[in-house]
Image (tube, coloured by chain):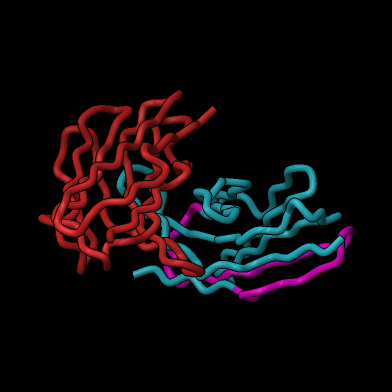
Amino acid sequence: GAVVSQHPSWVICKSGTSVKIECRSLDFQATTMFWYRQFPKQSLMLMATSNEGSKATYEQGVEKDKFLINHASLTLSTLTVTSAHPEDSSFYICSARGRSGRSYEQYFGPGTRLTVT
Amino acid sequence: GENVEQHPSTLSVQEGDSAVIKCTYSDSASNYFPWYKQELGKGPQLIIDIRSNVGEKKDQRIAVTLNKTAKHFSLHITETQPEDSAVYFCAASRGTGFQKLVFGTGTRLLVSP
């Protein structure tokens, strides 16, 4: 159990365009979802936290107008990178935390590799 | 805020040996300590976790120990296998809901056959 999927697994886009990444909890209801960014050989950097139906809480230094997060339902969250630039190229990973019984554990998706040309 | 330190940054062992990775945390209110394994190009996979009301937890070849007084916790892998090679991250959090995980810097484990 506790499977989180992400789509797409990789995407290449041109500078100035927007890209949407989907994150789904497949077998549990995710009350809280998290979005991370990871650079090569580095740890995970938390970008934002969201509860279903609420606005996301962004970490300091993360531009909320550039990284739009929508936690539309208990199983789906999306991250949209708007007006992407080469410096936005990175590995983006979502994670989800469930209700009681799974309220501590945080399960991660497989990640999305974004390359902006 | 919470700060998690992890060491060593790299660890090389021979197949069959044991591996130990250690982490320290700073926030005495942290009460949940998971360990993740991340293979190249993949998302982190939860391999074991421990809550602050427990001192040790074991799952087959993997065990985690927690010393709340000293604010440190460790991952122990016995009888290592080449497929254990990966990057391992420790993390700490204050618990459920919005409480975020604070990650260590990671340990690259290489198990040689």
Residue at 29% over, 31% down: A76
Q: Seen from this angle, which residue lies furthest top?
A: A27
**In the image, B111: left or right of B75?**
right
Residue range corresponding to the magenta coloring: B7-32
Q: Is residue A33 above or below residue B72?
A: above
Residue at 17% over, 33% down: A53
Residue sitting nearer the eye, A15 or A46: A15
Q: Is residue B3 above or below residue A17?
A: below
Q: Position of residue A92 (x, y in %)?
A: 36, 53
- The verdict on residue B18 being magenta is yes
**In the image, B88: left or right of B20?**
left
Q: Is residue A20 above or below residue A117?
A: above
Q: Seen from this angle, which residue lies furthest left?
A: A65
**In the image, B60: left or right of B98?**
right
Chain B colour in the picture: cyan
Please state the total of marks drawn on the protein image. 0
Q: Position of residue A66 (x, y in %)?
A: 14, 56
- The verdict on residue B57 being magenta is no
Residue sitting nearer the eye, A96 or A40: A40
Query: Quadrant of the image for the C terminus of chain A?
Result: bottom left
Q: Is residue A80 above or below residue B26?
A: above
Residue A89 in which image quadrant:
bottom left
Q: Position of residue B73 (x, y in %)?
A: 62, 64
Q: Position of residue B48 (x, y in %)?
A: 62, 47
Chain A colour in the picture: red
